[in-house]
Image (spheres, grey):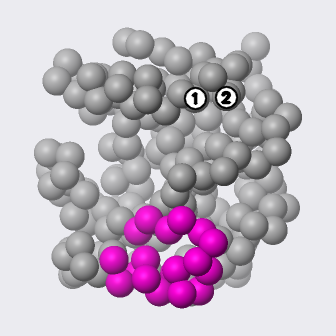
């Protein structure tokens, strides 16, 4: 049975969470181009909500952005340092999607959404940002169906035979199904 939750419900869930809004506002203060807070930040919130759990502690809070004019990793470390100065209680991790293709063996990404589309799992390929009016918006290259229906499946790049092991290893080491027991993990 499919969940009736959609993008607007996820936006409302984020907007009503003071901590998530604080994280988004803090990230927004960097004024990064084409930015979002992504991955487990959104995924865990939705899965917790659908399982009736309190907030899961995150090992990191991923901030993604796209700046082809400054692709050195030191820029990301500078941004992390600034964010830690603004709120050291948040485990910030900042990544420029304009350089992440080199780590993944891909052709260059064209945007943050393009970078997210190459994350290992469809349900992780989602981000949130604040628009110019301070309203929550989503970046979801594959939509939100897998996320809200508790389905874990690889993105197209990680279905290929040479990358499938990375997906399988992540699923095994993350231990998601031990916490969120209603997940359906697919092994294509």
Q: Secondary structure at mark 1?
A: helix
User: Would you say residue 80 sits in the magenta stretch?
Assistant: yes
Residue 139 in sight: no
Left or right: 149 in relation to 120: right
Residue 36 vs 188, above or below: the answer is below
**Disc 2 to disc 1, C-alpha distance:** 5 Å
Could you tell me which residue is drawn at 35 percent across and 84 percent down? 78
Q: Which of the labelled discs sits on residue 136, or is there none?
A: none
Residue 98 vs 116, above or below: the answer is below
Residue 4, given in percent of the width and then of the height, sits at 79, 30
Residue nearest the viewer, comparing 142 with 148: 148
Left or right: 113 in relation to 104: right
Could you tell me which residue is drawn at 54 percent across and 65 percent down? 91
Residue 58, given in percent of the width and then of the height, sits at 60, 52
Which quadrant would residue 97 be assigned to in this image?
A: bottom left
Q: Which quarter shows the C terminus?
A: top left
Tell me the magenta residue range.
77-94
Which quadrant would residue 181 be assigned to in this image?
A: top right
Q: Secondary structure at mark 2?
A: helix
Q: Which of the labelled discs sits on residue 179, or is there none?
A: 2
Mark 1 residue crowding within 10 angstroms, few (<14) / some (14–19) / many (20+): some
Which quadrant would residue 75 be assigned to in this image?
A: bottom left
Residue nearest the viewer, comparing 134 with 40: 40
Residue 11 in sight: yes
Mark 2 residue crowding within 10 angstroms, few (<14) / some (14–19) / many (20+): some
């Amino acid at each position: 049975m499919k969940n009736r939750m959609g993008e607007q419900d996820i936006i409302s869930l984020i907007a009503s969470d003071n901590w998530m809004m604080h994280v988004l506002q803090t990230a927004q203060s960097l004024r990064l181009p084409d930015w979002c807070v992504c991955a487990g930040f959104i995924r865990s919130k939705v899965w917790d909500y659908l399982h009736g759990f309190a907030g899961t502690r995150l090992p990191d809070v991923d901030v993604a952005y796209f700046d082809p004019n400054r692709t050195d990793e030191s820029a990301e470390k500078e941004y992390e340092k600034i964010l830690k100065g603004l709120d050291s209680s948040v485990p910030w991790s900042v990544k420029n999607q304009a350089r992440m293709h080199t780590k993944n063996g891909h052709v260059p990404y064209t945007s943050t959404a393009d970078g997210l589309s190459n994350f290992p799992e469809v349900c992780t390929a989602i981000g949130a940002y604040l628009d110019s009016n301070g309203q929550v918006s989503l970046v979801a290259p594959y939509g939100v169906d897998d996320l809200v229906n508790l389905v874990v499946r690889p993105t197209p790049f990680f279905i290929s035979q040479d990358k499938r092991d990375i997906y399988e290893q992540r699923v095994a080491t993350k231990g998601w199904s031990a916490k969120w027991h209603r997940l359906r993990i697919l092994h294509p």
